[in-house]
Image (cartoon, rainbow, N blue to C red):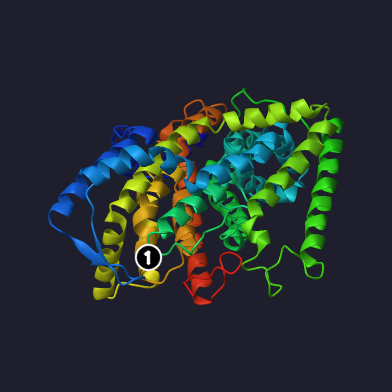
Amino acid sequence: MLEPSAKIQLEKPKGFIRFLNGIERLGNRLPNPFVLFICLALLCILVSWLVHAFGVSVIHPGTGEEIFVKSLISTEGLAFILGSAIDNFVSFNPLGVVLALMLGIGLCQKIGLFEAAIKKTILGAPKAIITYAVLFIGILGNIASNGAYVVVPPLAAMVFLAVGRHPLAGMAAGIAGVGAGFTANILITDFDALISGISTDAAKTISSDIVVTPIDNWIFMSISVFVLTITGAFVTERIIEPKLGAYKGSGQEEAITAVGPLETKALRNTVISALIYIGFVAICLFIPNSPLRNETGGFIPSPFLDGITMFLLFFFLTIGITYGVSVKKIKNSSDVTNFMVDGIKDMSTFIVLAFAIAQFIAYIQWSNLAIWISVDGSELLKSINFTGFPVIILFVLLTAVLSLFITSGTALWSVLAPVFVPMLMLLDFHPAFIQVAYRVADSATNMITPLNPFVAIMLVFITKYDKKAGLGTHISLIFPYTIAFLFVWIIMICIFGLFGIPVGPGVDMYLK
């Protein structure tokens, strides 16, 4: 019988590994995201000057006004660059929403709530549904941001080993859930807030009335959790485990540390506090003449949806404080503040990146390059009758390829959204639906690109059970999940579109 590592290496042709190695070499030549957006901003300045020199104009589809491309290398352009930099940064839509949410999510993460919940759920799952539990919790684990990467996969490997199954199968399921399925969730996360803000800014090129909220993909992403859980379990049990064979052992296995009685009690209290909070909000929503509903008594739009960020913030603060007090990590109000500060510290990289992204988006919109590219691009697609689902599927595939090179979901969407959101809006697609197409492609390929720093971390975990493991080992374990997840997601997009199922509350495929 072949050793586990040898069997894994045979999963994929060597040519595929060479292809990914080529991506790694090419991607390593790209600058880090901050410098990348500075370069894109400089490129935008140069292109605006060149296009302006030819007197290019376009008819705005909303106002009928003739819009000329403006040069950023001009008196007016330089005044904008120098005078608006701070305003561009401060008014960058995702900045305030993400930082506000992270006050609550960061508290929960630093207090240990998410890690305890993950461990309790996986370790308490019956043997028959362990695979499903690992994938389900792994997918939901993105609420804990990057912390899920270092908790779920190694824990899943130990659980699989404890019940006599191959630990690398558990590791693969954990990686697939956390990485390839990271965009899906039942809860609203900081990532929802972040990319919806970018989508809103991009949509303003066509209409200032359209706002993409953090819950505009909630229905699609909630259903995705269950679809991906079933799909991932099938891949694990029907493809990965049979090919791995019996586990021989490497002598480096670790013992599983169970959740203690204090943490268990704290989790129970947290669930109770969550239900109380949800019940209170529900009562406020459904009381007669509730101020949280609109004038006709509906919810779309409504003050409740307009203030959804604050409702989510208070939800995470409620459960975080409850858990912290229960485990005696929070003893006074200063402790709450300190944990929130620690959570915000983790966002320092995003804040720095947001400054560069904000300038790039502002430049491409002020110069009218975005509207010019979008209108001409949409007209080209219409002229060749390339509209409807084919263009969405092509966009998904394009994103899947680009995400191999730009691994930051925020950075890649900041590059694509200013062009593709208005372009596809001119084909009548809703920006939130376009956002769904982006999310599924970026998520599915997340863990097969060597440029993702977490791939290296996962490889360290894998070598605990297979000393001979390399990049090819990791890729061959995860690639079946990538293909399966991307396939079912594309099918879901088609089903939602064809049957008119909203991807979020009141959000259909097409603009109304």
Q: In which quarter of the image is residue 161?
A: top right
Picture coordinates of residue 332, whole percent (x, y): 82, 27
Q: What residue is at 22 percent from the left and 43 percent from the top?
A: 75
Q: Which residue position holds label 1?
A: 424
Picture coordinates of residue 379, whole percent (x, y): 26, 70
- Secondary structure category for the residue under label 1: helix
Image vertical order of residue 60 relative to residue 347, above or below: below
Q: Relative to residue 269, is residue 256 drawn left or right?
A: left
Q: What residue is at 78 percent from the left and 57 percent from the top?
A: 281
Q: Relative to residue 235, is residue 359 drawn left or right?
A: left
Q: Nearer the viewer, residue 398 or 108?
A: 108
Question: How crowded is the residue under tag 1: few (<14 C-alpha within 10 Å), some, or many (20+)?
Answer: many
Q: In which quarter of the image is residue 111?
A: top right
Image vertical order of residue 482 relative to residue 157, above or below: below
What residue type is disc 1 on?
Answer: Leu
Image vertical order of residue 228 relative to residue 450, above or below: below
Picture coordinates of residue 195, whole percent (x, y): 49, 50
Q: What residue is at 63 percent from the left and 32 percent from the top?
A: 343
